[in-house]
Amino acid sequence: MVVERKFIDDLMVKYRISKYLERKLSKAGFSRVDIQKTPVITRITVYVTNPGKVIGRGGETIDALTDNMKKRFNIENPQISVSDVKNEKLEPRLIAKYIANSLERGANARRLLHSIIKEIMDNGALGAEIIAQGKLAAKGAKAKSIKVRLGYLPKAGHVTKLIDEAKVASYPKYGAIGIQVRIVQPGTKFPAREIKKIALPKSIQAAT
């Protein structure tokens, strides 16, 4: 029971750190964070689109961030490193934020999701799923859900840990919309399963 409690606590701390960094580094294009604890240090790797804004002149920004996180989350000897996002089209959080902003500007939800999932698959993803749920129509319309899914995405078992995932909220004038993006990255290996490239449906191929 003690081990289970510690595991839950660690997950909660990681979640709080991720939400904190998402707020603090939004202008740097925060995508995700990887946390590895060792007996000596806690390695925190932040993935962003603009590393310079995280590091700051002479490293002053990252030094301040490290000090704040040490105090805020009681982390002993944190070491923060910054990595540049290699491909924004394969980063679930960045994609979800783009969808959220587009919906707030009045984009057609179904056309937008088809266009985005096409871009994801064109960039080599083995599978992808985008779900938008909430007030997707004009004022007075009922909440509904739109889901687009392509390729291979396991729904259960330990292999689901191999899927990158992000959830964000959009707030257009008619009401809130929840957005979930799940991506199986290129080169992901699943036990005893070979993933083949799929042909995109015509409705997705025509999306722009």
Image (spheres, rainbow, N blue to C red):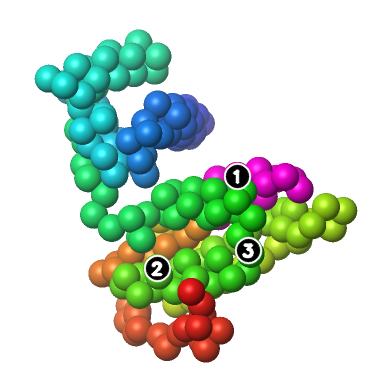
Residue 68: image x %, image y %? 33, 14
Q: Residue at x 39, y 18 (%)?
A: 73
Q: CA distance from mark 3 to mark 2?
A: 16 Å
Q: CA distance from mark 1 to mark 2?
A: 20 Å
- In the image, farthest residue toward the top: 71
Q: Residue at x 60, y 51 (%)?
A: 105
- Report the front residue among 166 and 200: 200
- Report the front residue among 112 and 23: 112
Q: Amino acid at mark 3?
A: Ala
Residue 87 in view here: yes
Tell me if mark 3 has few (under 14), some (14-19) or many (20+) residues whose alpha carbon lies within 10 angstroms of its own.
Answer: some
- In the image, farthest residue toward the front: 105
Q: Amino acid at mark 2?
A: Ile
User: Is residue 130 positioned above or below 40 on the image?
Assistant: below
| Magenta stretch in the rendered image | 166-180
- Report the front residue among 145 and 6: 145
Q: Are marks 3 and 1 in contact (CB under 8 Å)?
A: no
Residue 156: image x %, image y %? 52, 64
User: Is residue 183 positioned above or below 31 on the image?
Assistant: below
Q: Residue at x 26, y 15 (%)?
A: 64
Whichever of labels 3 and 2 marks the residue nearer the N terminus, that label is 3
- In the image, farthest residue toward the left: 58
**Residue indicated by mark 1:** 169
In the picture, the disc for residue 120 is 2
- Report the front residue among 164 and 192: 164
Whichever of labels 1 and 2 marks the residue nearer the N terminus, that label is 2
Q: Is residue 172 one of those drawn in magenta? A: yes
Q: Residue at x 72, y 58 (%)?
A: 136
Q: Is residue 203 left or right of residue 176?
A: left
Q: CA distance from mark 3 to mark 1?
A: 14 Å
**Residue indicated by mark 3:** 109
